[in-house]
Image (tube, rainbow, N blue to C red):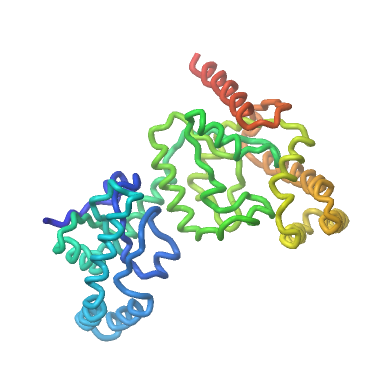
Amino acid sequence: MPINIIEPQEWVNKSLDGAQLVLDVRSPAEFQHAHIPGATNVPLFSDEERAIIGTLYKQTSRESAIKEGLDFFGPKMRNMVETVESLLSNPEHPLRKEVFVHCWRGGMRSMAVAWLLDMYGFKVTVLQGGYKGFRNWVLHQFKKEYPFTIVGGNTGTGKTRILYSLQKMGYTMIDLEALAHHKGSAFGNIGMPPQPSQEMFENKLASALFQCRNSDVIWVEDESQRIGDVNIPNDLWQCVIKKNICFIQLPFDLRLDNIVREYGNLERERLVNAVIRIRKRLGGLETQNTINHLIDDNITEAFRILLRYYDKFYEKSLSRKENVTSQLKLIESAINDPDENAVKIITFWQSIMLNSNK
């Protein structure tokens, strides 16, 4: 059975729907840093073996490196075949029949594994250019124009919950905070998994954009370009900041209730440490008052101070955006219900679309 070799765009068309088993045969460290979303790491070489082979290749010869690689590969062949068999028989993925394989550049590692799996009888496809080719595809996605519309609102409005209400209504959305494993504020990493590397965040974001490619509108939450330790790529950011912001105006007390519910049960020490990180902007007196309230378990008063701070911070960030007056579409609401606020947003958005088509 011939080994199929395909370009990155065709690979993405076929592999990102989850119907294929995608094997990343790079070393564990390479995979850990960043990988194609949905891929499984079945390394041809360990990190140590890869280092040995690389040294031989540079200091001795290509042939010496290949011979050493064969010594490492030989004892692993049976286990690799059985691993792939097990992965293909996983009842959670009954439609997986084809094996997609890639390494860093689509060179010897992926072709060696593809040869083995093909010889055993699997249907095998190799990514031309390897992971490097995929990364070129990723970076190209950020240069495109997308039909974003932004859900805005001060801290505590429940913008993320509104996004998921829009999704339930059948609209397309991308949860940037979920991709970044961070909620955007000084408290945004508390209770969240470790953030991905910048490269992995970009891989996940490009894949999410690709899956939205046929959508008339893509809803995203109003974010800063920086989300924790990762950044929205600048080319994509320039597209985002030109779009309309459907800004839900929810009363302060309702927003405070939301914040207390979301963060009130988190570990006090971590909350205090987060407050200390913003003390220069919050001010010495307000920092101390907030910490005292947290120590006294007066969560509502602590977050009352913080919410006022974030309201001022958000207003400043909005004012720095170009054309914000024409982009900002204010929607008043006295209802602390994401489903109803999503309906308000869609009703308003549809009126904008109707008027723009006249």
Q: Residue at x 23, y 57 (%)?
A: 126
Specify whether 157 is left or right of 78. Answer: right
Name of the residue lying farthest toward the front: 91
User: What count of labels does the image hold?
Assistant: 0
* Quarter holding residue 277: bottom right
Residue 56 percent across, percent down from the top left: 28, 83
* Position in image of residue 33 (x %, y %): 45, 64
Q: Is residue 327 visible?
A: no
In the depicted view, which residue is nearer to us: 245 or 159? 159
204 is higher (above) or lower (below) than 311 = below
Name the residue located 28 percent from the left edge and 55 percent from the top edge. Answer: 89
Residue located at (35% from left, 75% from top): 46
Quarter of the image with the N terminus in it: bottom left
Describe residue 1's horizontal placement relative to residue 230 as left or right: left
Nearer to us in this view, 311 or 162: 162
Q: Position of residue 222 (x, y in %)?
A: 60, 40
Which residue is nearer to you in this view: 351 or 304?
304
Q: Residue furthest left?
A: 1
| Residue 19 seen in the figure | yes
Q: Is residue 321 left or right of residue 74?
A: right
- Residue at x-position 33% and y-position 76%: 50
Q: Residue furthest top?
A: 358
Q: Position of residue 150 (x, y in %)?
A: 57, 35
In this view, the residue farthest toward the bottom is 60
